Image (cartoon, grey):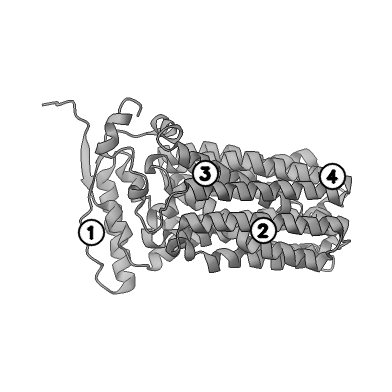
Amino acid sequence: MDTGEPATHETDVPARLDRLPWSRFHTLVVCALGITWILDGLEVTLVGSLSGAITESRTLRIDSAQIGAAASAYLAGAVGGALFFGWLTDLLGRKKLFTITVLVYLIATICSGFAWNFWSFALFRAVTGAGIGGEYAAVNATIQELIPARLRGFTDIVINGSFWIGAALGALGALAALDPSMVPPDLGWRAAFVVGGVIGFVVLLLRRWIPESPRWLMTHGQPLAAERVVAQIEQRVAAATGRALPPVPQSRLRVRCDVKSWFGAGLRTLATQYRRRTVVGVALMAAQAFCYNAVFFTYALILTKFYQVPARSVGWFMLPFAVCNFAGPLLLGRFFDTIGRRVMIAGTYMLSGILLIGTGWLFAQGTLGAAAQTAAWSGIFFVASAAASSAYLTVGESFPLEVRAVAIACFYALGTGVGGIAGPLLFGSLIQNGSRHDILSGYILGGALMVGAGVMQALLGVASERRSLEDVAPPLSAVASSSAVARSP
């Protein structure tokens, strides 16, 4: 007889995933999915390192301000892609979308290498950004849902920091692409984009072995499929470690299994029940996006315009910057699981903001040479890189599972829209004016945003270290919370 009660299912899927020891399966997840950030770093660095060569191209005929506009087009595409593909990720599943988004990326980045004028270049950069933006939502959600809770902070921060592995590869690739003895000058930068597309194809092959997220399946009306996938993961882990798996904790969750989409209910939850977390997420994402993109997208222009560094040598200055940016998350990442999220996130944000303002003042006074400027930026972003990575960790783990990808997409879009798109446009114009003191005002703004976000995290942040995702933010489909959302599936 129909009692009017929603269909439910009791599951221990989260507990089974969180108690697993690290194995080759987790390493595959990190490598196949985490490479997204390497690709993003490769793309951003290529445009930054090759900006001098692109402005000198006899076929494109674009100037410094248009390079900044193309960078903003990339970020605008990333915003749109994050929102659209993020919605599809929560609706259709993680696996389908992290396959589609890498396809979009690899096709568009190859097309970037065949651009014939500014408008075609900007369009292809926008579509490339859409693929990468969609990747952030689909991949961040999947990684957090497959990695055990005790290792989630360190793993997520290091993976996000791997952007700088891509940046280092991009810097080295730019050196080869700009070497006239190896590649004709107007062909080198084009070939660099095509190589990025080839790497994307390899990533596509690797991802064939990553399963759908069992957590997504259990909250989208497919509890039996979730159980089946977890059992397969357990078999792979047991075979890889050669040991019996730890016992499953007595922790079970009863969820509804009659709802396929929680989009409307989830967005309302972000604005009501999780309002404070929403404010913190926007602040963290906007501050790091403005700080990073303002400096990084115009890095090569600063070196070539104010320090007379030849365009073909910019990669040598990018390389130490990229190394320090990856070393920061790698060396500081464990403290986000031990000392805790609130202290580490607030501390890294405020310290990097203060250092950015100080270095900006030295730049305005003209007291730094090219090497000293690079060393100062490298030191700042050793800290800031860990801070920026923690922003993605925060917005991924602070909200219910059913809208995790949408939440990541919304915060990425808001943060990038406020900080990332405005940053390159503002700094591109300031650099075009040629005044060091004008550029200082931009550095002061970026530093102030970082300090402000750090203060907000200290006051409102959540202590989510070593806690299950379902403990940090109960699923909307959990029976205990179903009455609040049943009318808006």
**Figure quadrant of the C terminus:** top left
Q: Amino acid at mark 3?
A: Gly
Mark-to-mark CA distance, 2 and 1: 47 Å
Is residue 438 visible from the viewing direction of this image?
A: yes
Residue furthest left in the image: 1
- The x and y percentages for residue 475 are 33, 42
Mark-to-mark CA distance, 1 and 3: 31 Å
Q: Is residue 320 above or below residue 214?
A: below
Q: Nearer the viewer, mark 2 or mark 1?
A: 1
Name which of mark 2 and mark 1 comes first in the sequence. 2
Secondary element at image label 3: helix
Q: Residues within 10 Å of mark 2 (few under 14, many from 20)?
A: some
Name which of mark 4 and mark 1 comes first in the sequence. 4
Q: Nearer the viewer, mark 3 or mark 4?
A: 3
Horizontally, residue 240 falls left or right of residue 330, namely left
Q: Which mark is residue 281?
A: 3
Residue position marked by numbered label 1 in the rendering: 249
- The x and y percentages for residue 397 are 43, 49
Q: Is residue 190 above or below residue 25?
A: above
Q: Which mark is residue 195?
A: 2
Q: Is residue 82 above or below residue 13?
A: above
Secondary element at image label 4: loop
Mark-to-mark CA distance, 4 and 1: 61 Å
Q: Which mark is residue 444?
A: none
Horizontally, residue 42 falls left or right of residue 209, namely right
- Seen at 14% across and 26% down, the residue is 2
- Seen at 42% across and 59% down, the residue is 152
Is residue 103 visible from the viewing direction of this image?
A: no
Secondary element at image label 2: helix
Residue position marked by numbered label 4 in the rendering: 62
